[in-house]
Amino acid sequence: MKSTKKLLLLILLSALLLRLLLLFIDTQPLRSDSLTYHQIALSILSGEYTIEGRTTALVVPGYPIFLAGIYSLFGDGQFGVRLVQSFLDVLTCYLFFLVCRKFFDEKYSLIALSVFAFFPSNALYTQSVLTESLFGLFAMLVFLNVLRGSFDNRILLTGILFGAAILVRSSFSIAVLLIPLYLFIFKQQLFDSISIIKPAINSLLFITGLIIILSPWMIRNKQVMGAFTLATQGGSTLWEGNNPQATGTWNKQVADANVLFNDPDEVGREKEFRKQAVEFILNNPVRFIELGFRKLGYLFSSERMTLLYFMDSPAGMTSSQVYKTVNPLYMAVVNIPYFIVMLAGAWGLLMPFRHKFFVVGFISAWMITMFVFVAVPRYHYVLIPFFVIAAINLLQRGLGSITTLPLRSKLAGLVFTIFLLGVWISEFYLLYFRTV
C-alpha cells in the first residue's frame, strides 16, 4: 500500500512536470473554436455573453466561463489557461486512477494511469484553448460517480455532474440516456426487485439534477434568443455532416460558400440548417449511412489535430499540406501510442470486464453522435480513457486470451482492426503519396 502511494505520487508529479515543461512550447494565435471561446470569455468579463458584439448562444457557456475566470486572475493571455489546465489535467489523471481501481488491482491501475498520464495528446491538449481538458475533468467525475455501485443518495449528484459536463460540451448530451437504461436494465441487481417504480423514481431524480444545472442557461436563451436551446450551433453542425457536398468532416470551402452562416439570427439560422439537414437525410438514406461511416473514419483518424494546433497555418495551404510538414519524429511520438492503445483497446473491449455497460455505452453514445452529426479527429479525445481501460484489460489477460473469444467476437475484433488500419494507412498514403 505504501509503495503504491509512492508510485502514484511519482506518476502524478511526473505528469505535472511534463505539462509544466510544455508551457514553454510556442502556440499560434487563436483561431477557429479557440478564438470563439476567447471572444465570448472577454465579453463575459464585461457582463455580457456576446460574440462580435451580438448576443449569442452559439456555444454552451461552461468553457467560456472557465476562461473568463482565468482571465480575471491572470489576464487574457494563453499562459494562465495553459497553467491552470495543466494542474486540472493532473487531477483528472488522479480521478482516472480511482476509476481504474474499479476495474483492476493496484498494479494494473498504476499501469493504466501511466499510459493515460503520459499519453501525448492528453498532455498537449492542456496547452490549447479548447474544451478538452475541462471536459475531460467533468467526464471523469461522471464516470467515477457511475462506477461507485448503488446510486442511493448519489443519483441527483450524477445528474448535476452530467449537466456540468454538457455545459462544457453539448455533444455529450446523448450519453444521459445511459443512466435510465442502466437503472431499468439492472433493476434487479440495484434494487433487489423487478418493479419499475424505483428505477423510475431514480430516473426522475437524475433528470432533476440535469435540470438544476441546465435550466438557467436554457431559460436565459429563451429570454434573450427566443428558444430553449443549449447551443445554436447544433443545426449547422448537423448540416455540415449532412448536405450534398458533405465529406464527413468540417469543410471550410463548403461552409464559406453558404450565405446562411452569415445570417445574424442564430435561432432562425439553426432551424433552417436543421431543416435542410433532416431533408437531406430523409431523401438520401444510403448517402447518410455512407457519410456516417466516413465520419467514423475521421473520428478514429490520426492525432493530426493535436499537432496542427501548434502549427502555423499559412494562407493557401490546406491542413493536410501543413500536417505533411510536421517533423516525422514528432508525428511518431504523438501517433504511435494512440495507434497501440486503439488497437489493443479494440480487442480488450471484447473480453469480459466489470462495468462493461458504461464503458461500451459511453463509446457507443459518442460514436452515434459523430455518425449523425460531423466528426473531426480531435473528437476521439473523449474515447481515450475508455480505450486505455480496454487496452489494459487485454494486457492483464494476455494476448493469448484472444484465442478464447467466441467466433463472432473474433470477427468483430478483426473487422474493427481492419477498419482502423484502413483509416490510418489511407490517411498517410493520401498525405505522402497522393499527387494533386
Image: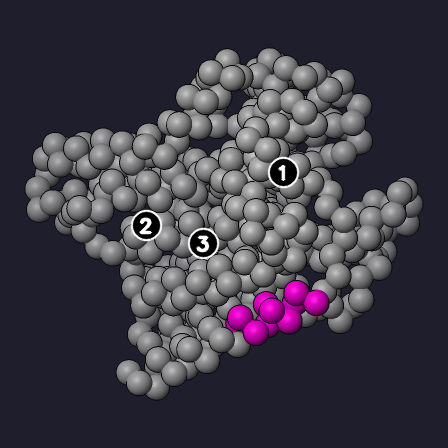
Q: Residue furthest bottom?
A: 3
Q: Look at the image and tell me in which quarter the C terminus lies.
A: top right
Disc assigned to residue 137:
3
Asked whether 50 falls inside the magenta stretch, the response is no
The 10 Å Cα crowd at callout 3, few under 14, some 14 to 19, many 20 or more, is many
Disc 3 vs disc 1: which is toward the camera? 1
87 and 208: which is toward the camera: 87
Residue type at mark 1: give it: Leu
Circle 3 — which element? helix
Q: Look at the image and tell me in which quarter the N terminus lies.
A: bottom left
The CA distance from mark 2 to mark 3 is 21 Å
- Is residue 418 visible in this depiction of the protein? no
Residue at (82% x, 48% y) in the render? 313
Name the chief secondary structure element in magenta: helix
Disc 2 vs disc 3: which is toward the camera? 3
Disc assigned to residue 357:
2
Disc assigned to residue 235:
none
Circle 2 — which element? helix
- Is residue 231 visible in this depiction of the protein? yes
Residue 273 falls left or right of residue 310: left
Asked whether 17 falls inside the magenta stretch, the response is yes
Residue at (29% x, 36% y) in the render? 209
The 10 Å Cα crowd at callout 2, few under 14, some 14 to 19, many 20 or more, is few
The quarter holding residue 403 reads bottom left
Residue at (38% x, 38% y) in the render? 163
* Residue range of the region highlighted in magenta in the rendering: 15-24
- Image position, residue 337 (x, y; %): 60, 68
Residue 366 falls left or right of residue 233: left
| Residue identifier under label 1 | 42
Q: Earlier in the sequence, mark 1 or mark 2?
A: 1
The CA distance from mark 1 to mark 2 is 41 Å
- Image position, residue 184 (x, y; %): 21, 38
